[in-house]
Image (cartoon, grey):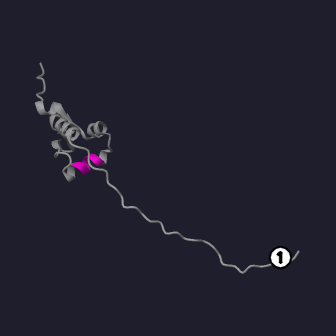
Amino acid sequence: MAKAAKTHPAALCLIRPGQLARLLDVDHSTIWRWAKNGVLPPPRQIGPAVHGWPEDEIAQLIERRRRAPAPAPVSKPPTSTPVVRMTRIMPRVKVAK
């Protein structure tokens, strides 16, 4: 009789990068950029090329962001477009009738 493989409880509640990208509605590369810049907590390494984020940490992050006040809209300074007059100065010519 074969023994059942033991699974680590934390491995059952990890969110993989693709799943997280769909959950947050961003691109896959944005997930890694946010992890690098500290927007997301660091991922846990499960295997040589397998990473994931604990589900509870992501849930807490989403809840904190929902409760946080919305950032003030960035106002751009008014841009003054220079008025360029495209008139050509030509001498008046009388047309013979």
Residue 38: give x, y in percent of width and height: 18, 50
- On the picture, is 67 further left or further right than 73? left
Which residue appears at 16% of the width and 30% of the height? 12
Q: Amino acid at mark 1?
A: Val
| Figure check: 11 above or below 43 | above
Q: Is residue 31 part of the magenta span, yes or no?
A: yes
Find out whether residue 28 is within the magenta segment.
Answer: no
Per the rendered image, the range of residues in magenta is: 30-34
Q: Establish if 85 lies above or below 31.
A: below
Q: Residue at x 33, y 45 (%)?
A: 27
Determine the residue located farthest toward the top in the rendered image: 1
Residue drawn at 26 percent across, 44 percent down: 70
Q: With 42 as the anchor, is 75 left or right in this view? A: right
Residue 76, image x, y percentages: 36, 58
Query: Which residue position is annotated with label 1?
Result: 95
Q: For numbered disc 1, what is the local secondary structure? A: loop
In the depicted view, which residue is nearer to us: 4 or 33? 33
Q: Residue at x 42, y 63 (%)?
A: 79
